């Protein structure tokens, strides 16, 4: 999951940095707080689910930097191992997952890059590496899902099994 570190100086956004690793992101926040002027600067770390931490987590009551190993450890533990797939975005049927062999996904980025290089040699540079992220929010309207299932002649669909991905809106 991607994290964004937003740094502020004198009330103006100074920088926004993206991180793929919560451990790297929280350490970057800690390092920024070490060097910032708490009177004029601030920083906060967010992910897709919202606020993670800010500069105050690394400042004592006198606005002096302090290590917060407990927070660093807690955020670092939440690191999800990334999952990679190789895809062909130019396939005539639309996006297609490609693989030299099973499995179709990779937990080891070195293995994914190695297979991608081999496949590009054989099939072309259009093959692309993607990182798979779990979906944690609703992505389809209930009415659209009902219409799709009707058009696909799916009669015994149980919406309760996927309700976390369905919203009621228009």
Image (cartoon, helix red, strand yellow):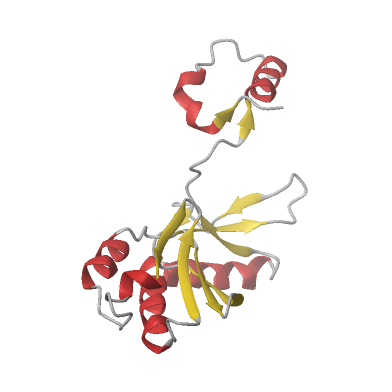
At 65% from the left and 64% from the top, the residue drawn is: 127
- Please state, as top left, top right, bottom left or bottom right, where the C terminus lies in the image: top right
Q: Is residue 167 left or right of residue 69?
A: right
Between residue 84 and residue 40, name the one nearer to us: 40
Which quarter of the figure has residue 72? Answer: bottom left
Q: Position of residue 124 (x, y in %)?
A: 69, 68
Which quarter of the figure has residue 117? Answer: bottom right
Between residue 45 and residue 117, name the one nearer to us: 45
Q: Is residue 14 above or below residue 150?
A: below
Between residue 145 and residue 153, name the one nearer to us: 145
At 73% from the left and 52% from the top, the residue drawn is: 91
Between residue 66 and residue 143, name the one nearer to us: 66
At 72% from the left and 18% from the top, the residue drawn is: 151
At 54% from the left and 16% from the top, the residue drawn is: 157
Q: Is residue 48 above or below residue 61?
A: above
Q: Position of residue 71 (x, y in %)?
A: 27, 66
């Amino acid at each position: 999951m991607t994290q964004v570190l937003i740094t502020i100086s004198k009330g103006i956004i100074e920088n926004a940095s993206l991180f793929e690793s919560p451990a790297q992101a929280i350490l970057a926040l800690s390092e920024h707080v070490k060097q910032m002027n708490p009177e004029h600067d601030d920083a906060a770390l967010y992910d897709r689910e919202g606020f993670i931490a800010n500069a105050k987590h690394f400042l004592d009551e006198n606005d002096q930097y302090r290590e917060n190993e407990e927070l660093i450890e807690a955020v670092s533990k939440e690191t999800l191992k990334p999952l990679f797939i190789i895809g062909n975005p130019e396939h005539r049927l639309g996006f297609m997952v490609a693989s030299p062999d099973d499995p179709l996904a990779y937990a080891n980025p070195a293995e994914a890059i190695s297979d991608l290089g081999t496949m590009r040699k054989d099939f072309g540079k259009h093959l692309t590496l993607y990182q798979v992220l779990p979906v944690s929010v609703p992505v389809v309207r209930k009415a659209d899902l009902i219409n799709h299932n009707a058009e696909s002649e799916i009669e015994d669909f149980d919406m309760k099994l996927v309700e976390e991905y369905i919203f009621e809106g228009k």
